[in-house]
Amino acid sequence: MMSKRADLYAYKTTFNLTSGASLDDFWSYVIFRLNVEKSEYTYDRFARVYNLLCDYKSDISKHPVSISLEESSHTYFISLNTSSTKLISEFMKRLTKLNYEYKYENNILNYSIEKKLHVNKLKKDIRKTYDYSFIDSDDISEMSDTLERMQEKNYEQLNIPLSINEVNEYRSTFSYYSSYLKYYSQLNTINNIVAELSVLLSLYPNECLAAGENFRVVVKSFLNSLEYWQEKLFIEGSQKIDFMDNSLKADLSQIKIILNLYDEIEDDSTCSIDDIFDF
């Protein structure tokens, strides 16, 4: 059911999407914004939007997409404008499958995403549908502890300027985490992403320090995404194994942008909606 557009905040954010880089800019804004809310439901819905757009990236270069976001205290209102009939058709098909109400006229698709859904209620409805028993339970436990320790340090350093010690802690965390992933060929894509980030932090510590709080924000977003990926796969078993591949690639690209490593960025992300999200 579409929410009423009452009590809208005074601002409106619009994204003009014409390429893979602009899609990454859109995702970067979303993860920064949603990290404040910590709502799994909202994160899921926006991640699905990003991956669907990613799947139609070649079409977007010919038919640019404009996405406008408005919000109230309870709801995000999305307006998507494009001349791509293929993209609009896929959006409407997915929305119908989710029983979302939407309105489409004059090439503009309007629908809404609720901001808050009680996480405990959401988890009650989750049924474990995938078995990833190939990974050792002790490895999962150590991987979880590794991320949790870094999150605890983040909390302790909340109001402290970024230091070389903090950069090195991130590097060590991702390097250690990767040391577990590398033993499982099924996790090769995520391992390459995490290992590359660790190497970047090792090679460019001064760039990290120069970026300061901006670097801290993007690397925390990456850490949050990694925790989310791990929980959905190995604790809940509620997603296919590659469901976060493109989101984590986008996070890594944003870190490179913050560090001014433009030559390092390769536009090599590929998406398959059916393999990532059942939007």
Image (cartoon, rainbow, N blue to C red):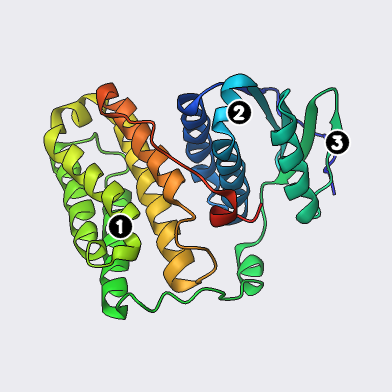
Horizontal side of 98 relative to 169 (left or right) equals right
Q: Is residue 274 above or below residue 105?
A: below
Which disc is residue 188 wearing? 1
Q: Pointer 1 and pointer 3: residues touching (CB < 8 Å)? A: no
The x, y position of residue 184, in whole percent, is: 28, 67
Whole-number angstrom distance, CA of label 1 to CA of label 3:
41 Å
Which image quarter: residue 129?
bottom right
Identify the mark nearer the N-term, 2 or 3.
2
Give SS at disc 2: helix
* Amino acid residing under circle 1: Asn
Give SS at disc 3: strand
Whole-number angstrom distance, CA of label 2 to CA of label 1:
29 Å
Mark yes or no: residue 260 visible: no
Q: Residue at x 78, y 42 (%)?
A: 92
The x, y position of residue 263, in whole percent, is: 26, 23
Front residue of 231 and 209 = 231
Q: Is residue 67 above or below residue 128?
A: above
* Amino acid residing under circle 2: Asp
The residue at which mark 2 appears reads as 59
Q: Pointer 2 and pointer 3: residues touching (CB < 8 Å)? A: no
* Amino acid residing under circle 3: Lys
The residue at which mark 3 appears reads as 103
Mark yes or no: residue 106 visible: yes
Q: Is residue 249 above or below residue 243?
A: above
Q: Nearer the viewer, mark 2 or mark 3?
A: 2
The x, y position of residue 21, in whole percent, is: 45, 26
